[in-house]
Amino acid sequence: MMANDPGTRLPAGAKPVRMIPVLGQVPAGIPEVKEQDIIDYVALPDAPDNSFALVVQGESMTGSNIQHGDYVIFVPKADIKPGDVVVALNEFNAAMVKQYMLKDGQPWLISTNPAFPSFQVNGAYRVVGKVVDVVRRIKV
């Protein structure tokens, strides 16, 4: 019997998991993700139905304890508020993970590592999703 068979019983206290697609890049058409955009899957309990994952590249968010190689789980087109960590695209549709803040009423994408720049949200940058979880795999 396979674990995903309808007759399979989970141990007491176990939560079912959802397979979250890991995107190689964030397509401009989120949430219209194509199969070729998916590079892997990560299994998570209690993940939102419409969530996706990205692998973090770089050290710009270490002030929020988001490290190079972590998976960020995000929900496209979710409501955001100042202080939320978001996925944004630049003018070349390259994805970035930043903290969304308001400065003098203007939206900004903040790098929480002060060694990296922050960006004002304008025509070159747009928020496409809200980060709802961070997953770190530790190899032993």
Image (cartoon, rainbow, N blue to C red):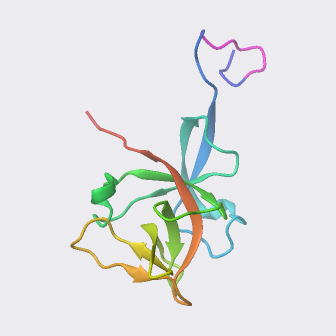
Q: Give the camera-side residue of 140 and 131.
A: 131
Q: Residue at x 31, y 51 (%)?
A: 65
Q: Which residues are magenta?
A: 5-11
Q: Where residue 56 appears, x then y in whole percent? A: 39, 60
Residue 103 locus on image (x, y percent): 43, 79
Can I make out residue 109 in this image?
Answer: yes
On-image quarter of the N terminus: top right
Q: Nearer the viewer, residue 97 or 106?
A: 106
Q: In this view, which residue lies farthest toward the front? A: 104
Residue name at image x 63 percent, y 37 percent: 18
Which quadrant: the C terminus? top left
Work out whether 37 lies above or below 7: below
Q: Is residue 57 left or right of residue 101?
A: left
- Residue 50, image x and y in percent? 69, 51
Q: Residue furthest right?
A: 6
Q: Which residue is located at x 71 percent, y 14 percent?
A: 8
Furthest residue in direction bottom, as rendered: 123
Q: Is 20 rendered above or below residue 81?
A: above
Is 136 inside the magenta-drawn segment?
Answer: no
* Number of marks in the rendered image: 0
Query: What is the magenta segment's predominant secondary structure?
Result: loop
| Image x and y of residue 122, in percent | 53, 88
Q: Is residue 80 above or below residue 73?
A: below
The residue nearer to you, when weighing 20 against 128, is 128
Q: Nearer the viewer, residue 121 or 4?
A: 121
Q: Is residue 97 among what the camera can see?
A: no
Quarter of the figure with residue 16: top right
In the rendered image, the residue lying farthest to the left is 115
Identify which residue is drawn at 64% across, 61% down: 79
Left or right, 49 with respect to 24, comes to right
